[in-house]
Amino acid sequence: MNDQTIVRTSTAALYDAHVLKNYARAAVTLVRGRGAQVWDDQGKSYLDFTSGIAVSALGHCHPHWVAAVQRQAGELIHTSNLFRNPNQAELARRLIGYAGPGRVFFCNSGTEANEALIKLARLHGMQKAGGVEGQCYKVICAKSAFHGRTFGGMSATPQEKIQKGFRPLVPGFVFGELNNLQSFAELIDADTAAIFVETIQGEGGVHACTSEFLIGLRRLCDQHNLLLMLDEVQCGIGRTGTFYAFEQAGIHPDAIGMAKGLGGGFPIGAMWVRENAADLFHPGMHGTTFGGTPLACAAALAVLDVIEKEKLLAHVTRESGPWHAALRKMAADFPAHLSGVRASGFLVGVQLTSDPGPYVAALREHGLLVPSAGGNVMRLLPPLNATAAELARCVEIFRGVLASGAIAVPVAKA
Ligand SMILES: *Cc1c(COP(=O)(O)O)cnc(C)c1O
């Protein structure tokens, strides 16, 4: 046994003995990363198109990000929200530059950003009901949505595998068909406070709201005095080639939940609320100890710096064209395995004809890390600065695995 084997054995053994068994983890221990590459404890390298589930927006250890975090770590890390800190102020200013006039609340994760949105909906409903609490509280969400694992987020996520075992849930969530405006319109009643959807569903299998649907939701919200709240936790922060995915529909939401890519690997979430609606929150009504620390905000500011300096929005848009085309060609060449590609920038869902498990494992074996999603979908989530060569390499590895016959051709179901 060499030293590396001992390290791996003990990591696996320690997980087995001591870590909660709430994940189906791959049997890989990752120890180092650079750009779009990561290495395991055996020295094997992988092209990382998981990016920590759309989190490592700049790839691993981008020098500007590392320098900013190191500098801040030696300066001031945490103070609580009992005091101001300059990084939080600056990050709010920068985000408003993308989202529009409004205010920002900082938290630590996607589900926490969504909790803030759900609480915003309750406050808006109370205001609608003339200050009476508990009357106007319904939020219309989408079937196959994913909004997180806390009680609010989970209650907005109508999936048996997420909700089972945890009922009763938070009341007030009802669900329409994505991209079916009529089905959302029919759910609106006097008790409705908000509409809340992912601009592009990530975990659900990379299903995007069409522009017409988003425009229609905006109109419904205006007609019925509802808040239009968008979950951009996965599709935001440049992933689709615009800073927020909804920009491509030309609409303006009332509130946005964001997280994943925002910190480039450092945990940070945020809720943006447009002016007026933001005034529903008063001191003491919501909060979190860790939200918007000097360190978390330094990490997020570094992400925004690099997105801007390296023109990553244009990069994502430009490189997506040939990459998507190559993926679609691959899908056409292997129709028994692949039945389509749904892609928006660097948020890609490859529709498989069967369970993604064997594909994800075979790609990992061949040096490509990718996550699956619901409905037999495999996601490809490169860092926003992935090069044309890395994108091409992803297709090359994928094609190699399909052509090798390593995965049995799924038997078509009758
Ligand atoms: C990941 C995700 C969440 C939950 O974020 P966490 O940081 O895991 O709590 C919520 N909404 C969407 C769209 C997500 O992709």
Image (cartoon, grey):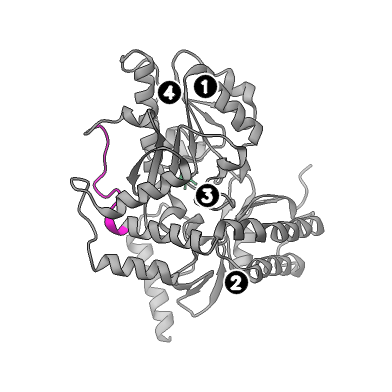
Which comes before the other along the chain, label 2 or label 4? 4
> Percent from the top left, x then y, of residue 95?
42, 47
Residue 172: numbered disc: 4
Q: Earlier in the sequence, mark 3 or mark 2?
A: 3
Left or right of residue 330, residue 378 in this image: left
Name above or below for residue 215 compared with residue 38: above
Q: Which residues are magenta?
A: 285-295
The residue nearer to you, when weighing 144 against 408, is: 144
Identify the residue under disc 3: 243
Q: Residue at x 65, y 68 (%)?
A: 388
Residue lying at 63% horizontally and 69% vertically, measured from the top left: 390
Amino acid, disc 4 = Gly
The span from disc 4 to disc 1 (Cα, nearest Å) is 20 Å
Mark 4 packing: few (<14 Cα in 10 Å), some, or many (20+)? some
Residue 167: x and y in percent read: 40, 31
* The C terminus lies in quadrant: top right
